[in-house]
Image (cartoon, grey):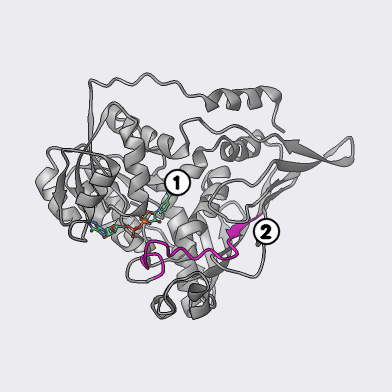
Amino acid sequence: MAKQGDLDAFKGNASTEEVIDATKKVRVGIIGTGWIAEAHVQEYKKMPDVEIVCAADLIPGKAEAFMEKMGVQGVRFYPSDQALIDAEKDNIDAVSICTYNRQHAPCAIYALEHGVNVMLEKPMCVTLEEAIDICRAEKKSGKVLSIGFQPRLDPNMQMIKKIIESGELGQIYYIQTGGGRRKGIPTPFGTTFIEDKTAGLGALGDIGCYSLDMVLNGIGYPKPLTVTGYCSDFFGKNPKTFTAKGYPAEYADLFSVDDFAAAFVRLEGGIILDFRIAWDMHLDTPGDTIFMGTKGSLRVPSTECWNGSIGGPMKIYHDVAGEGVCTEIPMLKSPEEGLFYHKLRSFVNAVKNGGAAPVPSSQIIYNQAILDGILKSNAIGHEIEIEIPEI
Ligand SMILES: NC(=O)c1ccc[n+]([C@@H]2O[C@H](COP(=O)([O-])OP(=O)(O)OC[C@H]3O[C@@H](n4cnc5c(N)ncnc54)[C@H](O)[C@@H]3O)[C@@H](O)[C@H]2O)c1
C-alpha cells in the first residue's frame, strides 16, 4: 500500500521547478496544423529554449492561418511533411507530428530517415506493420521518438505503477479496463476522426489507446500474446447520431471506423486483459479499471467522458488481520504547468541532452499490437496470435 512518504513525494512532483538553458535552442517544425497542433504550439511557446521555425499542412493556406491565429511569427510554410523535411532537415532539431492517424507512420518514418527527432501524436499509427516500420526507422536513425501519451504523466497514473511495483497487490492475474462516452463521436472539426482513409481507427485509436497505456504502463508493458477482438459501428452509421448534434446526416455515410470495441487479451506473465471502449453508448460508463491481484485488488474510477484521466480516488481492497478492508488513495495534484506541457518538455529535454524518449516506441508497439489485433481478430471472427519481429 502507498505510504505517506510516497504520497508526499508525489505532492513534491506537482511543482516542477526546472532551470532551462535558453542559450541552447531546439528548433521545431509542426507537421499538420489542425486541432491538436494548437496544444503543441501553445506549450512550445512557453519554453524559452524552443523556436517554432516551420510548419506544413496539406490544405493550402491552413498552416499560415494557423500560425497567425497562434501569434507565431517568422515561420516558413510548406505544403506537405516531405516538402518541410526536404527543405528544413538541416535547420530543425525536431518535428511535432500532429496529422491524422493514417499519416503518422509515413510522416514519422520520413522525418527519422532524414535525421530529425520526432514527437508523434497518439495513437502511434494504425497498424502493427506500420509500428514495426517506425521502430526500424527510429533504430536506424538513432534519433529520439516519443509518442504523445500525456495522461501517464499524471501523478495519479504514476501511483498505479507505484502501487503495483510495491507488491501490495501481489501477483496481478486479471485486468479490466476501457472507458466510454455517452455521446462522444468527435466531429467538431470535420470528419478526419471518423473516416477510415484519415483515422484508420475510431474509438480504439482516439481513447482506447489511453486505457491500454494506463494499465500496460502500470504493469511494466508485458508483451501481448493473443487477442480476441470485436468492433461495431451502430452509432456511427446512424444519421441521427450526427443530426441530433447539428452535424450533417451524411457523416453517417462517411463513418468507416469503430465506435465500440471489446477484446480479451492474453499478456506475457499469465495476465488476462479484458477491454472495452465506446465513443457512443446507452450507458454512463462501461466500467472502472480494475487490477485483481493475489494479495489485493485496485479499482481506478472511470470518468463519464473517457479521455485518459482518473475519475476519483483509487481504492485498494485487501485483508488486514484477516478482515477484508478498503483503503482509499488520496487524489494527487497534477503539475501546475499541465500534463501536455510536460509531455513536450520531457521530449525537448531528451532532444537537447541526448536522453531516452520519455514515452518509448518499444512500449507503445505493444499498445499498437493490441489495437491492430482487435481489428484483425474482428475481421476474421476468432482469436489471433500477435507476432512482433526483433526490431
Ligand atoms: N494527445 C492528445 O491529447 C490528443 C488530442 C486530440 C488529438 N490527438 C491526436 O492528434 C492527431 C491529429 O488530430 P487533430 O484533431 O489535430 O486532427 P485534424 O484533422 O484536426 O488535423 C490534422 C491535420 O494534419 C494535416 N495533415 C495530414 N497529413 C499531412 C501531411 N502529410 N503533411 C502535412 N499535413 C498533414 C491535415 O491536413 C490536417 O490539417 C490524431 O492522431 C489524434 O489522435 C491527440
Residue highlighted by disc 1: 149
Circle 2 — which element? loop
In this view, 230 is above or below 345: below
Prevailing secondary structure of the magenta residues = loop
Residue highlighted by disc 2: 287
Of the four image quadrants, the one with ligand 1 is bottom left
Q: Are marks 2 and 1 in contact (CB under 8 Å)?
A: no
Q: Residue at x 43, y 40 (%)?
A: 340
Kindly tell me whether residue 192 is visible in this rendering.
Answer: yes
Q: Residue at x 29, y 33 (%)?
A: 351
Q: Is mark 1 within 8 Å of ligand 1?
A: yes
Q: Amino acid at mark 1?
A: Phe
In this view, 55 is above or below 197: above
Quadrant assignment for the N terminus: top right
Q: Residue at x 32, y 63 (%)?
A: 102
Circle 1 — which element? loop
Q: Residue at x 29, y 30 (%)?
A: 354
Kindly tell me whether residue 386 is visible in this rendering.
Answer: no
Tell me the magenta residue range.
175-194
149 left or right, relative to 357: right
- Say how many tags the image has: 2
Q: Amino acid at mark 2?
A: Gly
* Residue 256 located within the stretch drawn in magenta: no
